[in-house]
């Protein structure tokens, strides 16, 4: 075993007490800073660090953020898209090493123009960062009035939506008629049917607070709901779902009833990552491993980087099928499934006792 996923599987990294990091993205002017300010006015945010990333050498976003919460640290560290790795790593290390109240969670506000992919990669790839921090998820603001036009004109805004766990519709108060929202909601669902959509402006700061405070170790239930949402995204999951295409992005779910031999599954995922890593915008799944049938393996990746996979103590529901959700750019769902089947068959010919 030599690929990216296999090495993670072999390293057996324990989740531990890592600090959750949430990325807040959203196109220019979509309301990130406004939401952040409303968040910072809520109680119970002690130990929250906020990293603001701005486009251009002289940013003003950090001046627009009210520093109202005790124990909140604000860092402004320049342009995320061209210096993402060193700046972000440096900012996180600085936060982790400072003295003072314990750090409980981090929120990174990205510049409105960036594709959040490199930021997520940095969070997942840097060994020093990974040992201290865990990616809690991505929240994305979408302007209820201008969102549709932005998605039409700016591919980076599509990518922001595609990688989000939560989509927060802003400026709904400016809509004359709530029905005007439906085409945008439909479009967002086509790009990313997995994300939770929050259109209620009032509750959005609380939604974001709950999200940034959630630790992965407490995520058993959300992992389960992920698949209900996936079902919504991809229709019937009895077999592999038909890809939903929009904006060059397709979403599908790969489903397998039979337990998968661990080595065959890891070899397949290594191969998929090596060949199509750049096009895997988001991969999330529960895997039924033949060698450990009672504990599902949770996999979670962004492009060619995956989190260390984690074993859940038990299946979150009676459904024990392997279900992997893919949000990709142009990856052929059928070919992906067939390759997995070939590798599993080959493995079983060599080691028939696995099942
Ligand atoms: N009416 C209304 N205005 C909003 C809402 N959210 C943001 N705005 C306004 O929209 C404008 C842009 O909001 P910001 O919060 O600065 O947006 P941003 O995403 O941080 O913008 P960038 O930093 O340029 O990427 C500001 O004038 C806000 O007052 C909302 O929910 N309702």
Image: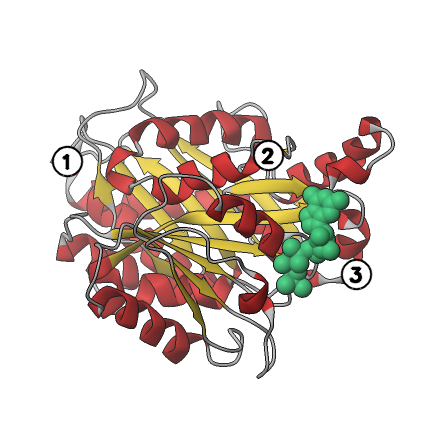
Q: Position of residue 73 (x, y in %)?
A: 37, 62
Look at the picture and state if 79 lies above or below 248: below
Whether the residue under disc 3 has CB within 8 Å of ligand 1 = no
Where, quadrant-wise, is the C terminus in this rendering? top left
Q: Position of residue 292 (x, y in %)?
A: 15, 33
What residue would you read off at disc 2?
197
Total residue callouts: 3
Residue ID for mark 1 = 291
Q: Position of residue 84 (x, y in %)?
A: 45, 75
Which corner quadrant of the image does residue 101 belong to? bottom left
Residue pictured at 65% horizontal, 37% vertical: 189
Q: Position of residue 47 (x, y in %)?
A: 30, 52
Q: Regarding mark 3 in the picture, which secondary structure is present there?
A: helix
Say which residue appears at 46% left-offset and 53% top-offset. Answer: 68
The residue that label 3 is drawn on is: 153
Among numbered discs 2 and 3, the one appearing first in the sequence: 3
């Amino acid at each position: 075993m030599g690929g990216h996923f296999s090495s993670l599987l072999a390293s057996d990294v324990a989740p531990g007490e890592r600090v959750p990091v949430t990325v807040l993205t959203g196109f220019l002017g979509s309301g990130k800073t406004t939401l952040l300010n409303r968040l910072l006015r809520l109680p119970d945010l002690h130990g929250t660090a906020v990293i603001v990333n701005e486009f251009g050498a002289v940013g003003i976003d950090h001046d627009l953020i009210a520093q109202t919460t005790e124990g909140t640290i604000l860092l402004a560290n320049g342009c995320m898209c061209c210096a993402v790795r060193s700046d972000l790593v440096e900012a996180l290390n600085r936060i982790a090493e400072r003295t003072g109240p314990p750090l409980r969670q981090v929120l990174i506000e990205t510049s409105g123009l960036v594709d959040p992919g490199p930021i997520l990669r940095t969070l997942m790839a840097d060994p020093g960062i990974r040992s201290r921090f865990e990616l809690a998820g991505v929240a994305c603001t979408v302007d209820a009035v201008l969102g549709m036009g932005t998605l039409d004109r700016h591919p980076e805004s599509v990518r922001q939506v595609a990688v989000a766990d939560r989509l927060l519709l802003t400026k709904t108060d400016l809509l004359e008629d709530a029905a005007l929202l439906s085409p945008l909601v439909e479009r967002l669902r086509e790009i990313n049917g997995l994300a939770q959509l929050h259109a209620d402006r009032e509750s959005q700061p609380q939604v974001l607070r709950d999200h940034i405070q959630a630790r992965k170790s407490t995520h058993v239930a959300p992992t389960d709901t992920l698949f209900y949402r996936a079902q919504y995204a991809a229709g019937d999951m009895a077999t592999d779902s038909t890809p939903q295409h929009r904006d060059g992005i397709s979403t599908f779910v790969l489903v397998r009833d039979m337990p998968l031999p661990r080595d065959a599954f890891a070899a397949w995922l290594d191969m998929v990552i090596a060949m199509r890593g750049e096009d895997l915008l988001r991969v999330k799944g529960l895997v039924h491993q033949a060698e450990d049938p009672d504990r599902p393996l949770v996999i979670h990746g962004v492009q060619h980087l995956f989190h260390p996979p984690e074993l859940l103590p038990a299946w979150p529901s009676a459904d024990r099928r392997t279900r992997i959700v893919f949000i990709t750019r142009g990856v052929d769902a059928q070919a992906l499934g067939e390759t997995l089947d070939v590798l599993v068959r080959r493995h079983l010919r060599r080691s028939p006792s696995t099942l």
